[in-house]
Image: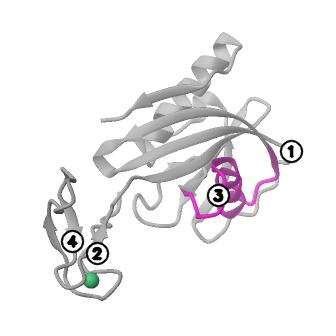
Amino acid sequence: MFDRTIRHCRQCGQAVERRVPDDGDTRVRAVCPACSTIHYENPLNVVGTVPVLGSRVLLCKRNIEPRWGKWTLPAGFMELGETTAQGAARETVEEAGAQFEIEDLFTVMSVPRVGQVHLFYRARLTSDVFDPGHETLQAQLFEEHEIPWDELAFRTVRETLLRFYADRRAGLFGVHSFDIE
Ligand SMILES: [Zn+2]
């Protein structure tokens, strides 16, 4: 999704080298040739919600790149100092200005191609009034047959919505953990 490759040392600003460190590590890392700092690059968590009001699901039309103008569930990068559920709730407030109660974890998806893990919680909306932030052009409730499947921003959103409707038809919501290539 984003290029966050380290190019300069976070300690001293020198251009880093890409090599296997001398400490027994087996992976190529960004190593500073000046101060020897090894920079470890690890996956980021993206956290969000499936906000539901009766039979309808809330989607947000993105006002930011990537995928400007496409529809998404409210989600974003987890911040330091918060739990996954707190992050999911915060993103739902920031992107939709929604009022809701957060419910159970619903999907956990590894996306190794972009170095991310996406987690979505179900959320029960308590109001149909939204106050979207600057990252959202429009926040709108959709019935299942109205979902803009061809205009969804991310594969993880599509996969989460597919499982949401399948579970709803089955009458039982589980937790779904799977990988996206
Ligand atoms: Zn350095």
**For mark 2, what is the residue?**
37
**For mark 1, what is the residue?**
126
Q: Residue at coordinates 66% horizontally, 52% vertically from top-left? A: 83
- Disc 2 marks a residue whose amino acid type is Thr
On the image, the x and y values in percent for residue 72 come to 53, 49
**For mark 3, what is the residue?**
91
* Cα–Cα gap, marks 2 and 4: 6 Å
Please provide the residue range marked out in magenta. 77-101
* Cα–Cα gap, marks 2 and 3: 33 Å
Is residue 61 something that shows in the picture?
Answer: yes
| Foreground: disc 2 or disc 3 | 2
For the C terminus, the image quarter is: top left
Relative to 27, is 111 above or below? Answer: above
- Does mark 3 have its CB less than 8 Å from ligand 1? no
**For mark 4, what is the residue?**
31
N-terminal label among 1 and 4: 4
6 horizontally vs 20: left or right: right
- Disc 3 marks a residue whose amino acid type is Glu
- Does mark 2 have its CB less than 8 Å from ligand 1? yes
Question: Would you say the residues marked 3 and 4 are in contact, meaning their CB atoms lie under 8 Å apart?
Answer: no
N-terminal label among 3 and 4: 4
